Image (cartoon, rainbow, N blue to C red):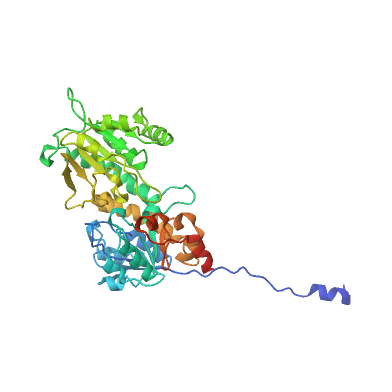
Amino acid sequence: METFSSSTRGQMATQTEMLEVVPRQQHLFIGIPRETILQENRVALVPHSVATLVAQGHRVMVETNAGHKAKFSDHDYSEAGAQIVQTPEEVYKADVLLKVAPPTLEEIDFMRPNQVLISPIHLPLLNPEYIIRLQKKRVISLAMEYIRDDDTGVYPIVRVMSEIAGTSAILIAAELLSTARGGKGVLLGGIAGVPPAKVIILGAGVVAEFASRTAIGLGAEVRIFDNNVYKLMRLQKHVGRQLHTSVINPHHLREQLITADVAIGAIHSAHGRTPVVVPEEIVKQMKPGSVIVDVSIDQGGIFETSQTTSLDKPTFVKHGVIHYGVPNIPSRVARTASDAISNILTSLLLKAEAGGILPLITSHVGLRNGVYTYKGCLTNTYLGERFQLKSTDLDLLITSDF
């Protein structure tokens, strides 16, 4: 029998086993209010997304009839595992609020410190009081328009809404050109022996790509302007055919616009207001009955004559030109748009399984890009300059929290 010396016995003593410590999952409490402004028909989470989140242990509270205009019933949400509540006061008790329209000042009154709000901001409708109210409530506010994907650099909600808006913009313009709507009485695609309508698209991003596809599919003559030559090349490649493209040369742009039947504004700003590309003097020279659809109106618009309109009164006429300035064009197809937004938000929320939503914000640069108020501080430099309010670097605030 083998024996061990006294010198080896101590070396064979049982060692303490080190187990990996797995962070405890922190479940989210998510609230979906019913939208009450801007004739908003969309909803931030659809029932199948609710079912996915509930299956992961998260709690979802939905205000009654929140999905009604997008054709989702309270029963659909209840079957998916959501809790249906009758008043906004109840749904605003949630830790994370998801909205497809900015909250009203009255809704901000329901909020509390450290609550997370994810919604659009709609720059033309934004005012200092709105920001100051969020600051006083110490709400952590994220603008959907500025949330960016860390891997691709794409703004996912902007992209998917842009796809819908680009297609819709051409269909809207085609209708507004009709005699019944006060337009020139021109068929967008023309017919044999009659030339098609001329469509000018300002911008070469996603809105422009889908607007181009739709306009070309209907037979229109399309011309695209953007100062980013790479974007023009990429758009031409994606569309798969030779297009008339140009940088934004003021003289050439004027020549094209004054002979155009339709002008589409499709320039997106990454941080603030879009630039005004078309001055009022050029709009005055456009053909009577021609149509402007300013998809960029949610960031201020690129036509100097643009104004924000609504789905119940979407157009106005200035200098004989029909203007369409609805900031939430995708709301016209509320079910499709709701599905698209919901898919993106659900993917985002599922990443917050360990530690909750705040660690997710601190660890994802693209998500931090969307934050504009943080625990009482304005963190968006552009908004600070626009409204003459003090802004603070978000990274400094987050560093001080840890």
Residue extending furthest toward the left: 180
Using the image as rendered, state which of residue 70 and residue 130 is in the foreground. 130
The residue shown at (18%, 41%) is 322
Q: Quarter of the image for the C terminus: give it.
A: bottom right
Q: From this viewpoint, is residue 388 visible?
A: yes
The residue shown at (42%, 56%) is 381
| Residue 197 sits in quarter | top left
Residue 277 location in percent, x, y?
31, 40
Using the image as rendered, state which of residue 10 and residue 285 is in the foreground. 285
Residue 67 location in percent, x, y?
26, 61
Above or below, 18 relative to 365: below
Residue extending furthest toward the bottom: 6
Residue extending furthest toward the front: 388
Q: Quarter of the image for the N terminus: give it.
A: bottom right
Using the image as rendered, state which of residue 295 and residue 214 is in the foreground. 295
Q: Is residue 127 left or right of residue 396?
A: left
Q: From this viewpoint, is residue 3 visible?
A: no
| Residue 302 sits in quarter | top left
Residue 396 location in percent, x, y?
51, 62
Q: Is residue 308 left or right of residue 134?
A: left
Q: Is residue 370 left or right of residue 178?
A: right
| Residue 102 sits in quarter | bottom left
Above or below, 293 relative to 76: above
The residue shown at (32%, 38%) is 202
Q: How many marks?
A: 0
Residue 44 location in percent, x, y?
32, 59
Using the image as rendered, state which of residue 262 and residue 98 is in the foreground. 262
